[in-house]
Amino acid sequence: MKTRNRSRWLFLFALILHGAVSWTGVQGQKKNLPPVPPDLDAITARVMETFEVPGIALAIVKDGRVVTAKGYGVRRLGDRAIVDSQTLFGIASNTKVFTAVALGLLVEEGKIAWDAPVIDYLPWFQMSDPYVTRELTIRDLLVHRSGLGLGAGDLLWWPPSTYSRREIAQRLRFIKLATSFRSAYAYDNALYLVAGEVIEAVSGLTWEEFVTDRILKKVGMVTTQVRYSATSNQGNVAATHAKVEGVLRLVKPMESDNTNPAGGINSNADDMAKWMLVLLNQGRLADGSRLYGEKTARELETLVTPVPNPLPPPELAGLKANFRGYALGLNVHDYRGKKVITHTGGLPGYLSKVTLLPELSLGITVLTNQESGEAFSSLTWHIVDYYLGAPPTDWVTAYAKVKERREFETSEALKKAASARNAASKPSLPLEKYAGTYMDAWYGDIDIALEEGRLVMRFTRTPSLIGDLEHWQYDTFIVRWRDRELRADAYVTFALNPDGTIDQVKMKAVSPETDFSFDFHDLLLKPKAKPAEKPAEQ
């Protein structure tokens, strides 16, 4: 296996270093363009080798022009099809600013107002707190300060569920707030889905139709798609890869469209270059007309919610910021005295990063077909430093060291949990007593059944969440999901009533590396009462 993998990587880097990947500029011009970092190909090759990324699409714009839009590597491990400037990648949460721009267009038309309550446009919408329901505004949908906890409600759509977009939005009223309203930052996806519902209610167009007709077509993003499911199409699409149990492999892409407003767009280097030029030019299009006005541009970039700003690890000390915050679909912070407007995106097998430095008229997009934040970050900061004329930093080595330490700490945390386990303990009840249907107020029903001598858990609205319960200790089990690509095994702890019946069940991810969208910890499962039997006919 190691020999075959090594040959794949040698082929990949041969493509990079020998120029087999073609250069394609968005404007089709090569003359008189601002210079690219002279070591761009070499540093990209090093990033890909260090962090095991099969393919990268990269776009750089500077001073109103496209410096480069190109591809590196391969779309799929084991395949010779190369990544080029037209290869589609899921951009995930880099979709959020498109949703913000869509709302901004409706504000410009007088159809909504940033600080008007959401219930003015969606009378059916509710949060768990009546005060928050009344006060939550259009702006609040975009800035992660509603009081919902980190990723709250994501299990309603991830892994792909059978809930519709409207059903997900309606179920938010059952999720208890983690903090008081507007008092803290906690990243969420679900309220962007609600923003999509506002767009449809006000415009008469679905989010997908509105973004396609009112944004993508005007910008000239002719190959960009607005649905997660577009990744399943044949053609020039990057395949999705991730490390599963330590081995880099293909993984299934996200194909459910119920949360497209939060992360459904698929794009490429050429189209993202066009998009960055519009963002940097305050909404002005290539022909001099406007997609959106200067006032909307200021709204998009103005910090609304302060974000915690801890010191970075010592290897990344150069990233120390004086401030961090969230604007409308965009993060805002400083770097070496310059304002940075940025966002990242993550999906199964895709990670992306868009970075804008308005004072330099600089924009950088990195799209990858592997789940390595270290890859897009080290490449981005290397490019930024070049245009700033900053002292060189070996970002690849720095991020590799941080990654190695994080993995060590995760391993130690798992070892510590295992060493504290009382492996000799037994469940309080026979296994069949744990079986039954349990209900969570916001998620719905979860079944636990005894099958061939072992307990099996099934999330009734999420087809891939099927797992076998292994006894851990006392009345705690670990659910091992049969789909190992999920990488989200979780503790399942039963609490008993005095009479020995089940009172409630709680869950918690086993590994600290588990993605926050697996918000098992927010579930409170209660045994579901069985329907009363009909009396026998006389």
Image: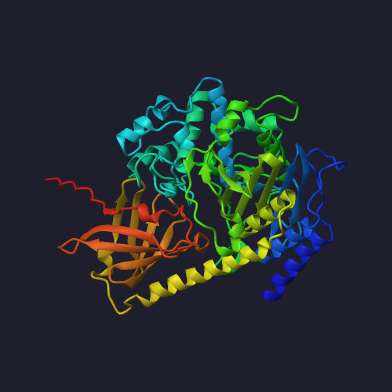
Residue drawn at the location 66% of the way across and 43% of the way down: 357
| Quarter containing the N terminus | bottom right
**Would you place residue 495 above or below residue 194 in this image?**
below
Residue beneath the point at 46% across and 48% down: 161
* Nearer the observer, 141 or 479: 141
* Count of picture labels: 0
| Residue 210 shows in this picture | no
The residue drawn where x is 48% and y is 34% is 195
Quarter-wise, where is residue 281 in the image? top right
Note whether 11 is above or below 386 in the view shown: below
Whole-percent x, y for residue 528 in the image: 26, 51
From this viewpoint, which residue is outermost toward the top? Answer: 110
Residue 181 image offset from top left, x and y in percent: 36, 39
From the viewer's side, name the closer residue of 338 and 462. 338
Give the image location of residue 156, x and y in percent.
42, 47
Task: Name the residue nearer the viewer: 437 or 130.
Answer: 130
Q: Is residue 450 visible?
A: yes
**Residue at the extreme left of the image, as rendered:** 538
Residue extending farthest to the right is: 31
Q: On the rendered structure, is 428 left or right of 277?
A: left
Please, is residue 331 above or below residue 348 in the view?
Answer: above
